[in-house]
Amino acid sequence: MNGITLLGLLAGTLTTISFMPQVIKTWTTKSTQDISLGMFITFCSGIFLWLVYGLFIQNLPVILTNAVTFILASTILWMKLKYK
């Protein structure tokens, strides 16, 4: 694994784990009042497309980080729809 791949994995990991506090807070409070539905639909769509792109170019950092980000963001989106 080269330095550029490690840099991509580190950058992706940091941006991905930034969603954890929101997932935890939303899960524990069951409150999604301040979360924009439109933003999360758009965001999840974009992350999914990044994941597809990563699969096409076979880039591990793009695939891994966007797969995890998609799961976390989709969890928030699911809770937004459930606790509306």
Image (spheres, helix red, strand yellow):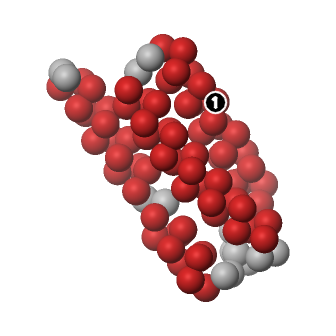
Residue shown at 70%/68% (left/top)?
A: 79
Residue 29 on image: x %, y %: 61, 85
Residue shown at 70%/59% (left/top)?
A: 77
Quadrant in the picture for the N terminus: top left
Dot 1: what SS?
Answer: helix
Choose top left, top right, bottom left or bottom right for residue 81: bottom right
Residue that numbered label 1 is attached to: 49
Please tell me whether residue 32 is drawn above or below residue 18 in the rendered image: below
Residue 46 on image: x %, y %: 65, 37
Choose top left, top right, bottom left or bottom right for residue 44: top right
**Closer to the camera in the image, 45 or 38:** 45
Q: Amino acid at mark 1?
A: Leu
Q: Is residue 27 visible?
A: yes
Please tell me whether residue 80 is drawn above or below residue 25 in the rendered image: above
Left or right: where 60 falls relative to 33: left
Q: How many tags in the picture? A: 1
Left or right: where 15 falls relative to 5: right
